[in-house]
C-alpha cells in the first residue's frame, strides 16, 4: 500500500474507533476486558481519535497528525497497563487488546517516520525543513508546430502573458537568466515575483524557479518533444508550487484558478490557439462576456477531439 493510502486508511480507522468510543463506551470497555467502564474517559479518548482522523484526512502529508496518533497510542497502552491491576478485569481480553494496540502503534510510528523523512520534490522551506504544502502538476498538449518554433516563442518570456491569462507582464533585467513577473490578484492586488532560469537546452527544455521573497513560490519545466509521425510537438509542463495561506492563499487561488492543474491545462490550450491561429477568441467586454479566459463557444470547440490534453 502506498504511503498516502496508508495514512488515509489510518485516518478513517481513527474516526471509526473514535465514534465507537463515543457512542458505545461501556460496550467497548467490556470488549477489551474492563469490568468497570469509564464512559467520560472513553468519550474523551473518542474525541481525540476523531480529531486525529480528521487532521490526517485534511492534509496531503499529515506527519504532525500521525505523530499525535503515536502519542495517543502510548496513552492507550498506559491505560491498558493500569487496567491489569484490578482482579475483576479480564486479563485475557486486555492482553488481546494490548497486542492490537501495539500493532497499530507500530504502524502509526512507521507511517509517521516515513512522512517526516520522505522527500518532497522542491518541498523545503528556507530552513531546509520539509514543506508539505508543495504540490506538483504535469500537463501536456500536442501543437502543430516544430519544437524549434515553440522553444523560441517560450524562451522569450515576454510572450508568456499572451497565453497565460492571469499574467499582466513578464520583463527581463540586465541578467538574461532573470525575469520579473506581475500577475493579477484579488481586489486589484498585484502579485509579483522574480524568477531565474535553471536549465536551458535549446529546442528541448526550459526550467525556471522563483527567487528571493516571492509572493508565489513555484518552479516549472517545459519540454518540447517532437511528436511521432511529424505531427508537430508535444509540449509538456511540470510545475511544483507552494500554496500559501491567508491573503496570499486567496491571491494564489485567483492566480491559478480553483484548481491549479486546470489552469495549466487552460494555458496550454491558449498557447495552442496563439501559435496555430495567432489569437485567443474571447467575448470579454461584451454584454455577455466572461470576466477572464475564452468564450463559451471556444470552450465547446476545444472540447471536441481536435487534440488531447493529458493528465498525469
Image: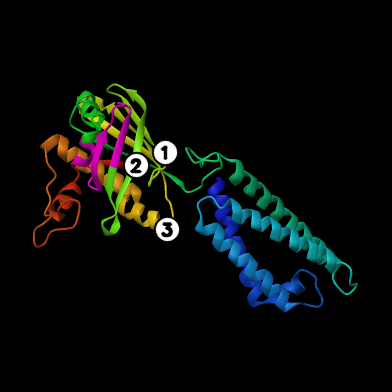
Q: Quadrant of residue 114?
A: top right
Mark 3 or mark 2: name the one nearer the start of the chain.
2
Task: Please give the residue where the numbered disc 2 appears in the rendered image.
Answer: 193
Evaluate whether residue 273 shows in this view: yes
Q: Residue at x 20, y 35 (%)?
A: 159
Left or right of 294, for residue 25: right
Q: Quadrant of residue 135?
A: top left
Evaluate whether residue 257 shows in this view: no
The percent position of residue 91, horizontal first and vertical second, equals 86, 66
Q: How many marks?
A: 3
Q: Tell me whether circle 1 and circle 3 mark residues in contact (CB < 8 Å).
A: no
Task: Please give the residue where the numbered disc 1 appears in the rendered image.
Answer: 212
Q: Residue at x 20, y 49 (%)?
A: 303
Residue 21 sits above or below residue 56 on the image: below
Q: In the structure shown, which secondary structural element does the residue marked by tag 3 occupy?
A: helix
Using a 10 Å C-alpha cutoff, classify the residue at mark 3 as few (fewer than 14 neighbours), some (14 to 19) or many (20 or more). few
The percent position of residue 267, horizontal first and vertical second, equals 25, 43
Q: Which residues are magenta?
A: 159-181
Task: Please give the residue where the numbered disc 3 appears in the rendered image.
Answer: 246
Amino acid at each position: 500500500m502506498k504511503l498516502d493510502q496508508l495514512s488515509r486508511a489510518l485516518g478513517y480507522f481513527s474516526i471509526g474507533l473514535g465514534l465507537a468510543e463515543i457512542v458505545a463506551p461501556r460496550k467497548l470497555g467490556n470488549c477489551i476486558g474492563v469490568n468497570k467502564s469509564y464512559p467520560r474517559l472513553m468519550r474523551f479518548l473518542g474525541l481525540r481519535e476523531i480529531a486525529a482522523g480528521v487532521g490526517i484526512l485534511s492534509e496531503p502529508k499529515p506527519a504532525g497528525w500521525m505523530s499525535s496518533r503515536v502519542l495517543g497510542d502510548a496513552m492507550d497502552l498506559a491505560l491498558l497497563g493500569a487496567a491489569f491491576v484490578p482482579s475483576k478485569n479480564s486479563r485475557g481480553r486486555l492482553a488481546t487488546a494490548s497486542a492490537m494496540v501495539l500493532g497499530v502503534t507500530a504502524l502509526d510510528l512507521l507511517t509517521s517516520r516515513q512522512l517526516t523523512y520522505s522527500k518532497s520534490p522542491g518541498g523545503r522551506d528556507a530552513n531546509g525543513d520539509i514543506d508539505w504544502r508543495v504540490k506538483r502538476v504535469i500537463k501536456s498538449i500536442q501543437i502543430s508546430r516544430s519544437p524549434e518554433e515553440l522553444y523560441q516563442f517560450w524562451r522569450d518570456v515576454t510572450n508568456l502573458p499572451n497565453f497565460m491569462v492571469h499574467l499582466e507582464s513578464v520583463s527581463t533585467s540586465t541578467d538574461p537568466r532573470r525575469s520579473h513577473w506581475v500577475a493579477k490578484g484579488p481586489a486589484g492586488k498585484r502579485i509579483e515575483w522574480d524568477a531565474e532560469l535553471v536549465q536551458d537546452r535549446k529546442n528541448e527544455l526550459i526550467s525556471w524557479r522563483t527567487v528571493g521573497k516571492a509572493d508565489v513560490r513555484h518552479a516549472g519545466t517545459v519540454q518540447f518533444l517532437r511528436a511521432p509521425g511529424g505531427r508537430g510537438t508535444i509540449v509538456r509542463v511540470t510545475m511544483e508550487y507552494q500554496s500559501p495561506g491567508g491573503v496570499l492563499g486567496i491571491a494564489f487561488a485567483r492566480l491559478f484558478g480553483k484548481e491549479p492543474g486546470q489552469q495549466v491545462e487552460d494555458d496550454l490550450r491558449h498557447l495552442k490557439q496563439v501559435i496555430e491561429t495567432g489569437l485567443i477568441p474571447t467575448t470579454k467586454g461584451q454584454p455577455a462576456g466572461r470576466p477572464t479566459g475564452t468564450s463559451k463557444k471556444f470552450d465547446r470547440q476545444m472540447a471536441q477531439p481536435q487534440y488531447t490534453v493529458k493528465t498525469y
